[in-house]
Each structure stands twice: as structure tokens, then as C-alpha cells.
Amino acid sequence: MADTLGFLAKIGERLPGAERPKRRPSLGMRLVYTGIALVLYLFMASVPLYGIKHAPRLFGELPQIVQIVFAMAGGTLAQLGIGPIVTAGLIMQILVGSKLLKLDLSKSEERRKFTLAQKTLALIIAGVEAGGYVIAGPQFWDLTGPNPVFDVDASAWIRFLVWLQLVAATYLIMLLDESLQMGWGIGSGISLFILAGVARDVFNRMFSPLPVSSTNPQPFGFIPYLVWSLRDGSVSIENIMIRSSQTMYLPSLMGLIALFIVMITLIYLQRMKVYIPVTTQRLRGIRTRVPLQFLYVTNLPVLLVSILYSDLYIFYTLSSYNPTIAQMFGWAIYYMRPISGFYELFSNPGRVFIYILIYTLLALAFGLMWIEVAGLNPSGQAERLIQSGLEIPGLRRNPKVLEMILGKYIYPLTILSTLIVVAIVIVADIFMTYGTGTGILLAVGIVEQFYTLIVYERALEAYPILKRILGEA
């Protein structure tokens, strides 16, 4: 495994990449670079792939949650979105967390090797996924015979060209993310593109004037629909709240209200803290408190479950030429598919119950796994407290004792916060929240991260001495 990691890292070292700026750009310039990265991504998400006849349609449009989590746009240069990057990161984190890869990510050299190997793995995954879309001919072209691999109206050259576009576009997205994280911009490109996807979905659901379909002239967006209903004379409380039983999955007032309630709830919960009393060895008698976020693992468990579902759905789509494999993935994604509004509670309660059970168990497993991988477990926190010269009053300065005490806080907090986040996401999906429950959860967390980063950068610019104190000079 170590040899494989080294081999991947060597390839990653030879791939073109962004370099850290020699001099830290000003906050204004970093915001400009971040804006340019966002515009480039949105441009790629709007430019159709050259050589295809239609966007992937074998199993219908990609589920909303898949498009949001992977920042995908079907039939465009952003067809793969950030999927390969996120999937590669998840695989690498699991390998390190399970000790299959012996890496100490606190060391800069090993962290660099990890990053380079992850970059190569993401490119390999992009090549495989792009190959899957091209090989599964009906994804982009029409069938001319019974064989979905060979009987399509596209030459080998066109298929190769589409594959090349997908891989190149994914690599460009990787470079945009890398350049932002290297210090040219603010935050992470992955977070930025997810936020853009959520914002675009919410905007479309509120303001899109396009008709629902060729047979349904209703505007898709809720605001244009409201105006259309008033002009048409068909406005009613039922139509405004749920868009009637025939169009219940379209944007409605209920989804808009749920959007604001979910956002306010998440903002409130993210500001809640659990405090652990500590003291310092140097200043006896001086006591303070170490804050732990109430949402201890934030949105990570839900994000990882969504990534798993999204990957399964993509593999399901790409395995169309093999009915046996497609059926295997089909059963999995059927029970992991998010709830499609409160009508499904009554029309398909069995599937809803199994979905909630699977979703909750997976989120708990990912939450507990993440605190171990990220060093947020009791032993990691105890080690940081001791290194900072802090201790819990009345206890010996012993890592094992500290670990035992912290475990009484951290594990229950991880489980409770995961269950609360899962409940919010499920309820949000039941009430058809704009952007989906998972999307809004991710968006609120990302906006808070960007806000914190901008405040931090402004403080460094306002007080240059802080750069020396914090080692940012």
C-alpha cells in the first residue's frame, strides 16, 4: 500500500498544479481570484459537451441531491463536477483512518505526499467515470441496435473527444480548487462550487420563468408561477402551498417557508457551544472553559452519506449495459433515495421507514469514524489540551484520565449532533425545501466558513502585527 501511495504521489508531482504565491495577495485580490474561479466554474456548467446529442437521460435527470453534492451539470463540461475529487478524498481519508495507510498528517512531508496521491487518484477516477459515460452509449447518443456499447450513432473519435473533454474539465476544476487553497483565493474551491450549486437551485426554484414541460405551461419558479396564477385566475391556497396534487414536486410556498425555517434553525444550532471547565498549570487558580461546537461533526456525516448515495447512483447509471449489476445498484439507491415530499409518507411508508433507518445508521457510523480520522476523538483532544498547558480541575495531568473524561462529552455529543442534523435534513426533504435539506445544511456551513475567513483576513490587514504573531507574515 505504501508503494502504491508513493507511486501515485510521484505522478501527482509531475502533473501541472498551482503554486503558492510568493507574497500574500491582499484580501481584495483574493476575493477577485475567488470570483474568477466561480465564474469559470459556472461557465463550464453552462457549456455543452461537443459531440453529444443529448444530456444523460437513461434514467432521467440526475437527482437533485447528486447535482448539488457533486456540483454537476448534466451534458456540460461540468458533467462530472467535483465528484472525482470528493470521492478520491473520501477514499484516502478512510484508508488513513483505518491505518491501511501509515501516514502522520501532522508532518508536512507526509501531508504533501497524501495531497499529491489524492490528486492523482481523483484524475484516475475522472478517467474511469468519463469512460463509463462514453462506453454506456445511450447516455449521450441514440442506440442503433441492441448493444448499448457498440450500437450507438457516434464514432470512436467522437467518443474519445467527449472523454477528453470530461477529463480535462475535471482537471481544470481540480486546479481551480488547488489555486484557492494555495492562497490565491478564499477558502476551498469545492465548498465554493457546492455553494454555487445550491444557490443556483434555490434561485431557479424561486424565479425561473421557464415552463415546466412542453405539455405544462406553468412557469417552474414559484414567483413567476404566482404571477401566472393571478393572471390566469387559478390562484388558490392549495395551489400556492403545494402546487396541487398533480404538480406537488414543483416549487411551492411550503418549500420556501421551510427554506427559511431550516436556515434559521441551522444558524442557531451552529452557534451553540458545550463548555468544558479547564485550568492552566502556569497560572494556578485561573480557570476558563474550552468550547466544543454543539454540532460537533457539523455537516460531515450527512455529506458523506450523500457522497455515498451519489457515487452509487452514478455507478448505477453507468452500468446500464449490464442488467445484473444495474439491478444490484438499483436496490441500493432505491432505499437510499431522499424522501420526495410528504406525499411519499403516505404513498410509500415502507420505503420511507427503511430510508430513515439506513440514513441514520450510516450517518452515525460516518460521524464516529470522522472524529477518529480527523483527530477530534477524546485522545486527540486530550493531547491538545496537555500541549496547551491546560487541564481539567481536580484531575491528575494524565492523558488517559483526560481522555476518559472527555469521552463522556465527545461521544454523546457526536451521536446527539448527528441525530439532530439527520432529523433536520429529513424533515426539510419532507417539506420539499428549496435546495434540499442536505444542500441547505452544506450551504449554511460553507457561508459561515467564508464569513469567518473573511473576518480573519480583514483583521490581519487591519493589524499587520498579527501576521507576525500568527506566523502569517
Image (spheres, rainbow, N blue to C red):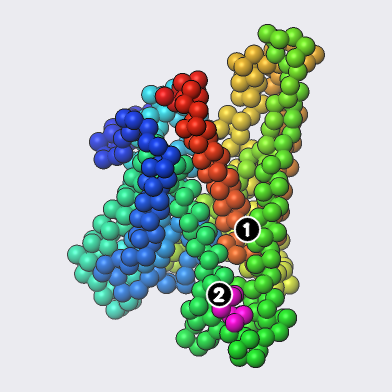
The magenta segment is: 221-227
Q: Which residue is tagged 2?
A: 221
**Where the N terminus falls, by quadrant?**
top left
Q: Nearer the viewer, residue 19 or 65?
A: 19
> Which residue is outermost to the left?
157
Indicate yes or no whether the magenta region holds residue 26: no
Taking the image as shown, residue 332 lies to the left or right of residue 409, namely left
> Which residue is outermost to the front?
462
**In the figure, residue 117 lies in which quadrant?**
top left
Q: Which residue is tagged 1?
A: 437
What amino acid is found at the position of numbered circle 2 in the picture?
Gly
**Where the C terminus falls, by quadrant?**
top left
Residue 375 to residue 124: above or below: above
Q: Nearer the viewer, residue 102 or 413?
A: 413
Residue occupying image coordinates x 73% and y 25%: 289
Q: CA distance from mark 2 to mark 1?
A: 19 Å
Badge 2: how crowded within 10 Å, few (<14), some, or many (20+)?
many
Residue 230 to residue 268: above or below: below
Do tag 2 and tag 1 residues touch (Cβ < 8 Å)?
Answer: no
Residue occupying image coordinates x 23% and y 61%: 160
> Looking at the image, is mark 2 or mark 1 earlier in the sequence?
2
Residue 40: give x, y in percent of width and height: 35, 55
* Helix, strand or loop status at disc 1: helix
What amino acid is found at the position of numbered circle 1 in the picture?
Gly
Residue 348: give x, y in percent of width and height: 69, 70
Residue occupying image coordinates x 59% and y 75%: 223
**Predominant SS along the magenta part:** helix
